[in-house]
Image (cartoon, rainbow, N blue to C red):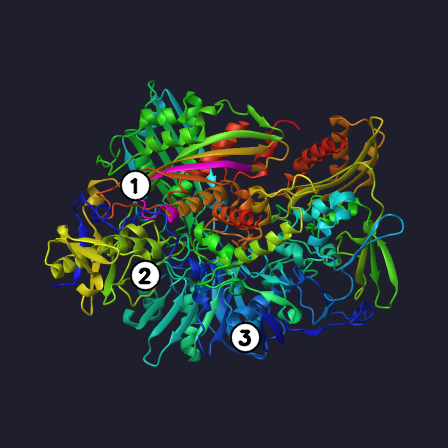
Amino acid sequence: MSNTNSLKMDKPVPASLLDSGSQGIIGRPLDRKEGPLKVTGQATYSAEYQIPNLAYGYLVGTKFGRGKVNKVDADSVRAIPGVIDVVTDFKTFLQNSQQGGETSAPTQGVQDVHYFGEIVAIVLAESYEAARDAGIRLKVEYEEAEGRFDFEAHKDETTKPPPNNIPAHFKQGDVEKAMADAATSVDVTYTTPSQNSSAMEPHASIAVWDEDGALTLYGSYQMPTSDKSQLAKSLGVSDKKVRIIAHYIGGGFGSKLGIAPESVAAAVAAKQLGRPVKAVMTRPQVFETTVRRSNTEQRVRFSVDGAGKLTGVGHETLTSNLPGEGFFEPTGIGTHFAYSGENRLINHDLVELDWLLSGSMRAPGEAVGMMATEAALDELCHKLGVDPIDFWKQNEPSEDPEEKIPFSTRQLVRCLEEGAKKFGWSKRNATPGQVRDGEWMIGMGVAIAVRTNMLMESSAKVAIDANGRATVSSAMTDIGTGSYTILGQIAGELLGLPLDQVSVVLGDTDLPDAAGSGGSWGAGSSGSAVYLACEMLREKLAKAMGCDPEALTLKDGRAIADNRQVSLGSLVGDGIEAVGSIAPGKMEKERKQSSYGAHFVEVGVNATTGEVRVRRMLGVFSAGRILNAKTARSQCLGGMTFGIGAALTEDLVHDPRNGKLVNHDLGEYHVPVNADVPQIEVHFLEERDQFANPIHAKGIGELGISGCGAAIGNAVFNATGIRVRDYPITVDKLLDHLPPV
Amino acid sequence: MKTFTYEKPASVEEAVGFVGAGTRFIAGGTNLLDLMKLQVETPDKLVDISRLDLAKIEDTDNGGLLIGALVPNSDLAADTRVREKYEVLSRALLAGASGQLRNKATTGGNLLQRTRCYYFYDPAMACNKRTPGSGCSAIGGYNRILAILGASDSCIATHPGDMPVAMRALDATIITLTPGGDRRRISIHDFYRLPGDTPEIETVLEPGELITHVELPAPVAGKQLYRKVRDRASYAFALVSVAGLVSVENGKIATAQLAFGGLGPMPWRDSRVEEALIGMAPSDEVFAAAADILLADAQGYGSNDFKIPLMKRTLIACLRELTA
Amino acid sequence: MHFTINGTAYTAEPDIRTSLLDLLREHLGLTGSKKGCDHGQCGACTVLVNGRRINSCLSLAVMHQDDEITTIEGLGTPEDLHPLQAAFVKHDGYQCGYCTPGQICSAVGMLDEVKKGWPSHVSETLGDVEFNDGEISERMSGNLCRCAAYPNIVDAIRDVAEAKA
């Protein structure tokens, strides 16, 4: 008998065992399992493994934006005390990071340089200090070439990219006609700049080869299973010869989905030196050589008829990327189903530039797409003189407006209504610029949140040992998302064990393949794998008890059936285990699956200077079952704070002369600090999504950012009457429109 | 970071004895090490003055304060005398950097903090201040935080500090020990240099000359404030800032001391602005006229054009508050 | 060179250029202090030197041979948490955990600054300083958290401050 319980989501799962568990820990706001390790500095991140005979690597990037490296002059630094060698491999080094989930190598080869800062060499030394000194002083001979560094200059030269998770172009009906026939319409263009994920842990890899030619890479990566394949392909070795260990990851937000240049540089150098190599990016290198969220220019059109019903939606976006890199920021991904209207045009075109690769950052698509659409919708409501919440009540679609399939769940209007009540939305003065608090102009804004739900192939093993303790193991990761805890809660609920009787081991490709963390699919996918493994274990336990699985109660480490109670340990002999494996199926085509929410924001805009401060912020979200109310809330806090950054402070500036990222550090790329963030309120609606997966949970990590920035911009408009269509909303953009001092 | 030799003198006199072209004093190190890591600064000898006896704040005979060069920013901001009589200084210090940095950054070092110009910080780009003669990438580049006053064709860097702006408004005197063993008293108004065609020279200090103290004159009557406008609520450099001390008597402005951050290569002060205020009855028109005088020669370089209206608006609001 | 860290004497021979942070992480195996930017722009490296919070990345190890250094490892252990460590767990004052040791060391130093009556940028007056959420946020703004646990960090610190008071 196979020891694997597999499920393809071809059918809904109406009853989840999580609703009939007896342990009562699912959903509860339990403390993180790994919390004590993290708060005492005992959680080990990639660069922190104590490896004997380690050589320090310092990555060297180019000081030009386009051209060719003629020579890396190792002799220029060899005499520096402590320097071991300089390693470069023009063919193997990564030109770009890989996108998430790919199993092929990313674009390789660094002799031709495609963007400023591309990593072309790694200097190895006995100490970090010597490696850094030599790395900065290393002479690289090169020829510069003309490049395309200026978005504005090239934005009329576009290409249609290949389909991503949505097609690049989509058309239904006739938006032009809908606009022409509209009783009221808006046609506005919003722009967002490049952004950087700025995870607090810089990208880091330690590469260790053994005598059999197998590589262990301690790497800060979100998706170890596919990252392993990427790394193996890049190095030209078998997948079986590569192991990635990523027990703790200091944040990722998309920037660590695929492998980045330091991994291959470390591996190549370690091979060549015959000793382990550690390569940690400097903060500017994280900015310059990993991945950015593309800048966007988005034309948004909405048309409504005389009855106030949406008749048309247009969302046309320009994004940028390197030539040949197909990824485009899918800004319209939420537009496809969020808004009703029979006439629809949702297009994405690429402007090819010699800028750092663009790829995924928290909620690719919705995060910046909804900053445009939800602001434009606010403009429409203002024009109509309709409260946005009333607008939604009238325009809420009853089914997916394009696929014409039902929504698996959609509690958007309830999110808005609940939020309005809790926030005191009725106190908003809809006329802008009316409320003052001393020098501060006060305004409120609202926006919806949608984020597509995804299920990815994922597996996990769950074992019960002779002591009745369970161990969950999977190549899944916890990047701060709470995986350790929620996977333990699922297993504990289904096996009747308190959380401290469940060990969770993650972040190692020697464990069962998993989807990893990204796209908010982690909990749903890996949680379902754990569920399925536990389902099989329950069958085994029932068999051992001589009862039907349905007649078995598991609680506090004991199995109960037919008035008989025994400890789990006594039922499993030397121990039992099972593997659970989930895969997406027909349900993703038959039901539109998404999580929903509503953002409410109050801002103050300084009437003298234009400084914007968020004073209050509240979100109501529905995302299926909430697996842990504490960690889920934290995910939302994080997303909403990203929203503050996107709306007000984050602006990654490319120098149009060479593509260089001018503000490539945390001093000048402004992520929100504690003082920028109020005591945000988060609420969840009760929900189960039987079409999503057997645990009935949907993604939560990216919902909080989706739409959030628009709610802030809408509040700024309500405070001042000024509509800034060029994010972030900084003082310089408000100043000329503020009332006289 | 290039390697260096390390000296730890036991006295101020011994410290200045280490004079040499490649010698730098290190105290808090928060700016120097930052720049050394990037090889923007490449001293071959570091003279550790952090344990010298220069960390006291003493009353002076004429009612002012003598602040040791090694007094950390935190301690200076928290000193009761500073909080009571030099509020502008306390406020400026508290508006700068972070709690951790203020605990390490010193009074002397903070006066010598170098520009945060993006291109100065990046050895991949040309910069006349870092590498004289290499050119200025900021002109024609991104210059949001850079100068609108006092710049030159070779450099548009701003002085990034907050404390020095307050010190300039307070007419501080900087006291040094020269390598020859002489004490020098330098008015803060004479301490900084405009970039001209030698932007690498930022102050009148001679090589090896050590700041030992900063002296504040007796406190003046009137209101004091420090207002800083920045791109996030905390932990960011100033876009513009105002340090102000103004007194009003009989309905007229009696005294006015105003200095400005974020505008130029040095903490900025313009006596004509104060002259335009003194003797006048406070009014928005008077304030606007003063702001216009301050900004008459202001020049934007593209991404920092907004500083001109921002400064005007901020100054008017500050003057209103100072004369209310 | 000789150092006293968490009450323990250490001897090491680092390069003269070694920062206090790299001494801890690369020479002494004390990897609880984190490197997020190496330039004083994130606060992940915050440690306590003679009880004061500083950025260990912007300080040379050689300059700290006479100091009492306290790192996150010296505040508590998983089995015996410092009150702030326990409060961070309870309030979920972290997510990925990378900025966390710096946040906690910073909070320890910050509460001591409050105890000494030091004002902050947001203090209404420079006289008697009030202690509220706004004060916590401002005083903790030298510690970036990209996961953005800020509201929970404020809750955790407020809890401990109130318990002390």
In the image, is residue A154 above or below residue A491? above
Please provide the residue range marked out in magenta.
A613-631
Crowding at dot 3, Cα within 10 Å, few <14 / some 14-19 / many 20+, comes out as: many
Q: Quadrant of residue C134?
A: top right
Say left or right for A589 vs B213: left
Q: Chain of mark 3?
A: A
Residue A624 covered by magenta stretch:
yes
Coordinates of residue A700 in the picture (x, y in percent): 35, 45
Quickly name the residue at label 2: A504
Give the amino acid at mark 2.
Val
Q: Which mark is residue A594?
A: 1
Give the amino acid at mark 3.
Ser
Coordinates of residue B254 in the picture (x, y in percent): 85, 33
Q: Earlier in the sequence, mark 2 or mark 3?
A: 3
Question: Label 2 vs label 3: CA separation?
Answer: 35 Å
- Element under disc 1: strand
Give the amino acid at mark 1.
Ser
